[in-house]
Amino acid sequence: MSMPEILLIVAQSDNGAIGHQGAMPWHLPRDLKHFKAQTLGHPVIMGRKTYDSIGRALPGRQNLVISRNAALALPDAQTCPDLATAIARARGDKIFILGGAEIYRLALPLADTLLVTHVHTTVAQADAFFPPIDPAIWQETACETHAADDANRYPMCFCRYERRR
């Protein structure tokens, strides 16, 4: 049996921001649609704070939530004590890591692919960040640019990075 592909999917600002006070610092329907198209039908792994910010499990996906609280029981997701357990329990040929910052930091060395929405704004008050993408390790293999519009306040690029082998 081959190892599943591990993908980190993230939306980050020009200054690497991914969150502010437990929430995403923007509402971008285009990015949410892209996120759903990528992850639907695949297992998703997230930290408990990310689960709380979403407010529920994501439908059509196996939801695995990492928590140090062994007593935490979620009605619609499996809780796991650590990232390794979550990856082992994930069923599928692709496993998506949804964050937050601490989970991304732990998962980055294990990832095969990064799916990054570069949101072209700066979030001065951010308190959660994505680790820098090192071009010596990651090669951009695709990038799709979108202008801002009535529904999406900021321009964005959907970029794919593959680990250099």
Image (spheres, grey):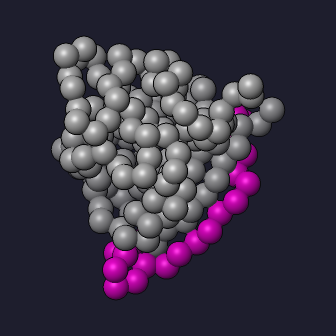
Q: Position of residue 49 (x, y in %)?
A: 25, 35
Q: Is residue 96 left or right of residue 17?
A: right
Q: Is residue 122 above or below residue 99?
A: below
> What is the tally of numbered marks visible in this picture?
0
Tell me the quarter of the image containing the N terminus. top right
Residue 18 in the image, given as x and y percentages of width and height = 36, 47
Q: Nearer the viewer, residue 20 or 88?
A: 88
Where are the magenta residues, as a range?
A: 135-154
Left or right, residue 100 beside residue 134? left
Q: Is residue 145 magenta?
A: yes
Q: Residue at x 34, y 80 (%)?
A: 151
Q: Residue at x 32, y 35 (%)?
A: 77
- Name the residue located 71 percent from the left edge and 37 percent from the top edge: 163
Q: Residue furthest bottom?
A: 150
Q: Is residue 81 above or below residue 159?
A: above
Q: Is residue 84 above or below residue 159?
A: above
